[in-house]
Amino acid sequence: MTLLGPSLAVSAILFALGVFGVLLRRNAIVILMCVELMLNAVNLTFVALAEARCVAGQIFVFFVMAVAAAEAAVGLAIILATYRHRQTVDLRYINLLKG
Amino acid sequence: MALAPLSALWLVPALPLAGFVLNGTLALAAPGAKRTVSLVGVGVLVLAFLAAALAVAQYTALAPAAPLVFRYWEWLPARDLQVDFALQLDQLSAVMILVVTGVGALIHLFSVGYMREDPGYARYFAYLNLFVFFMLTLVLGASFPVMFVGWEGVGLCSYLLIGFWFTEQVNADAGKKAFIVNRIGDFGFLVAMFLIFRQTGSLDYSDVFTKAGAVFVAGGPVITAVTLFLFLGATGKSAQIPLYVWLPDAMQGPTPVSALIHAATMVTAGVYLVARCGVLFALSPLASAAVAGVGALTALFAATIALKQWDIKRVLAYSTISQLGYMFLGVGTGAYAAGIFHLTTHAFFKALLFLGSGSVIHAMHRAYHLTHAHDDAQDMRNMGGLAHYLPWTAALMWIATLAIAGIPPLAGFFSKDAILTAAFAHGAARPIWYVFWGMGMAAALLTAFYMTRLMLYTFHGPNRTGERERTQLHEAPWGMTGPLLVLGVLTVVGGALNVPTLFGGAARLERWLEPVTRLARGDGAGGGVELAAATEWALVGSAVLVAALGIVGALKLLNPAALVPARLAPPERGLGRFLWKKWYVDELYDAVIVRPVVWVSREVFWKVVDVRLVDRLLVNGSAVLARVLGWVGSRLQTGEVGVYVVVFVVGVLVVLVSAVR
């Protein structure tokens, strides 16, 4: 039996969770985590489809993981710097770019 | 190098240009270097005259059948429109370059004395040299665009020199008036050029004139439009009705400028243009009649105004307009040789008259300057009896006066007589020319009268300058009187250029110009009707009689002893006032053209178009629009990441949905 259908369903659920997390939460760290969740949902899709179609999807996952690691490092550094500056990571209070 | 002087034809205009560059540099770098400036300014003209004389001499020796065209470089290569910068030497331009450089050199020489004290000495000579360069380009150009460069250039120099003493408002205004009125004429020239190019596909004289007969329907509307627009250009430059108004005001410039530009050379450009395009004018009887008619009318009209002017230079200015009218009567009749002949002789005697008046003004101005008086040095009512103080000037100006009046055997007699005879002869073919001839005769009478009046009031009777000033009146230095003498000699012998066969002469100028004028006579429209010798003698006799009548009448009727200085003179009344006010033409133009234009400019173009439409709607309007759009855009920038994310997600969903569909 193939796991393609359940895998895609799980990744869709994970992706949706990530989107709603980004939309609804205010804490910058949680938002960053939700972004990671979305990336991993995509990874799952790649892997699942690689089984069915071709192996390139699995290779792509490595790239995504590398980029995600870099993104997490940069994102956390920014959040840390912001926190030092404003003593908060709540995005409602970080709105200097308001027009 | 058999062709040496001819192939160096480019030197003729290039020398004055070099003079302009040198003097222009000196004017900026060392305005005090008057010796160098005089040397350069006069030197280039003398050299240019020599170059021109050599070239013409060689041309005569070669006697080529067609005009010699020298192409120097490709100027406007624009697909169908191919214009080379080319100079052309033929019989007509040969006459013109000799007159321009010859008379020009004499006037430059005179200027050395006249302008000696002026702080703008170098600038003056720079402009004068530049003018000669443009004038030579005008007459030597081998195509309409090259001629147009010279045409615009002389207009520019005229503007610069009329307003030479620009610190006084009236001088600057006169310069502006000349420039603007000339622009109206230039518009006509341009339109004519466009039409010619549209019809013939070329602007070179050689092409246009050979194709003209085949392309244009003789007497058709197109050729009539072309020639009338050309004539509009000519009336602007040559001060004919209705565009003559700038010339009297042009007398605000230095007097040698009036002599060179506004009497001897530039104003004859229109006559040259009509003579050059004789082929075209011959195809349009209507335009020819317009040229002759306007010429005759201007000759008479300007002569009446000259009767009552007091400013010595203004009398001469109106006299110039009147004489230019004669030239147009000549070329309009198809008597191109007569018109060009009068152009040449007029250059001699009018330059002499102007330089003579310059000599008078120089003396008057000096006298007033030394006694710190503030009277008008140009008003004839302040002169009188000057023959005693300026004997040479008086004698030479009398010669010129007799010449312009048409007393034999001076130059003006032959040329004016040639024009009037041609006009009368043409009357046999087209009776309207009898009217033109009559107007010409009337103008001749008035010419003799007003010129005698000028001489009488300036040089004879008691002196009205003032007790103290009288002792300061002297003849100008020889540097100034010398050119007058040369011009005096030319005025006396100039007629020998073209003694008609009637007097046993060879009509040399007429035969010399034959290759040019023959082209124009192709269809016989301009062909002269041969008159019986008896009729010609009668015409000559009546012309001389009329001239003598004018002179004697002036001597009998006018009494210089009854004049009072300008300060004390009572205002004119009646017809005299009407003429003194120049038929109120300036006032008429002011009311009919200038004021409405100014009104429309102020009330419509400024207050509505500029202030409301451009400033308010377009300039401020676009700024307001940008601000509103910016405000709307700034509302989107909340600075909250959450909002951005919502927009982003919605956007992605929209893209996805539309992609899947």
Image (cartoon, rainbow, N blue to C red):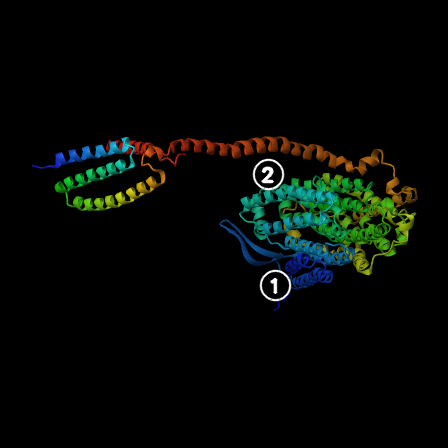
SS for callout 2? helix
Three-letter code for the amino acid on which mark 2 is drawn: Pro
Three-letter code for the amino acid on which mark 1 is drawn: Ser
Q: In the image, which disc is placed on residue B221?
A: 2
Left or right: where does residue B487 sit relative to residue A28? right
Q: Tell me the residue at 74%/35% (across/down).
A: B587
| Mark 1 neighbour class, 10 Å CA radius: few under 14, some 14 to 19, many 20 or more | few
Rendered view: B43 above or below B451 = below
The spot of residue B586 in percent (x, y) is 74, 37
Q: CA distance from mark 1 to mark 2?
A: 41 Å
| Mark 2 neighbour class, 10 Å CA radius: few under 14, some 14 to 19, many 20 or more | few
The number of discs equals 2
Left or right: where does residue B370 sit relative to residue B282? right
SS for callout 1? helix
Left or right: where does residue A94 sit relative to residue B136? left
The spot of residue B84 in percent (x, y) is 55, 54
